[in-house]
């Protein structure tokens, strides 16, 4: 019975930790030594880890050769940079922040937010200075 529940709860791209290339797990372990509750998924040719550090949810995307491509972590609305909060209020008045993540890629930090108004959600990405960014939203 538990096998059936496991199969129903997991996406078809979930993989076992033993199926992740050693180069990926080595980079992961050295970059995120305090990671707990790690789950792996295959995303095209890349590998995505979902995990916790303390009480914060993280995701990290690695190439098959072990290069960390990007990572993200949950950010409480109160901890968003003031510039990002200002960008949201200027461009999306009346919307409230439903979810926010910091995304670190190529040495830059972006903030992706789910905004909600009248039961409708919209997803946006901002640079750290509060300007809309060209980065795609990472689900």
Image (cartoon, rainbow, N blue to C red):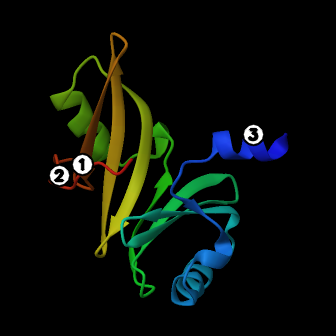
Q: Position of residue 139 (x, y in %)?
A: 39, 47
Residue 119 versus residue 23: which sits nearer the camera? 23
**Marks 1 and 3, Cα distance to the nearest angstrom?**
38 Å
How many neighbours does mark 3 have within 10 angstroms: few (below 14), some (14-19), or many (20 or more)?
few
Horizontal side of 99 relative to 14 (left or right) equals: left
Mark drawn on residue 126: 1
Q: Position of residue 116 (x, y in %)?
A: 35, 22
**Position above or below: 126 against 50:** above
Residue 50 versus residue 33: which sits nearer the camera? 50
**Position above or below: 99 against 52:** above
How many neighbours does mark 2 have within 10 angstroms: few (below 14), some (14-19), or many (20 or more)?
some
**Marks 2 and 3, Cα distance to the nearest angstrom?**
40 Å
- Label pair 1/2, CB-CB below 8 angstroms: yes
Label 3 residue SS: helix
Q: Position of residue 20 (x, y in %)?
A: 57, 77
**Marks 1 and 2, Cα distance to the nearest angstrom?**
5 Å
Query: Residue under circle 2?
Result: 133
The numbered mark, 2 or 3, whose residue comes first in the sequence reads 3
């Amino acid at each position: 019975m538990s096998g059936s529940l496991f199969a129903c709860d997991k996406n078809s791209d979930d993989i076992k930790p033993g199926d992740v290339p050693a180069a990926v797990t080595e980079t992961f372990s050295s970059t995120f030594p305090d990671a707990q509750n790690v789950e792996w998924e295959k995303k095209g040719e890349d590998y995505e880890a979902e995990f916790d550090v303390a009480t914060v949810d993280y995701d990290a995307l690695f190439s098959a050769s072990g290069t960390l491509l990007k990572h993200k972590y949950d950010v409480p609305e109160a901890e968003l940079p003031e510039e990002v909060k200002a960008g949201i209020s200027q461009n999306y008045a009346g919307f409230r922040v439903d979810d926010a993540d910091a995304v670190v890629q190529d040495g830059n930090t972006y903030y992706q937010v789910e905004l909600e108004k009248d039961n409708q959600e919209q997803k946006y990405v901002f640079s750290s200075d509060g300007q809309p960014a060209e980065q795609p939203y990472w689900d």
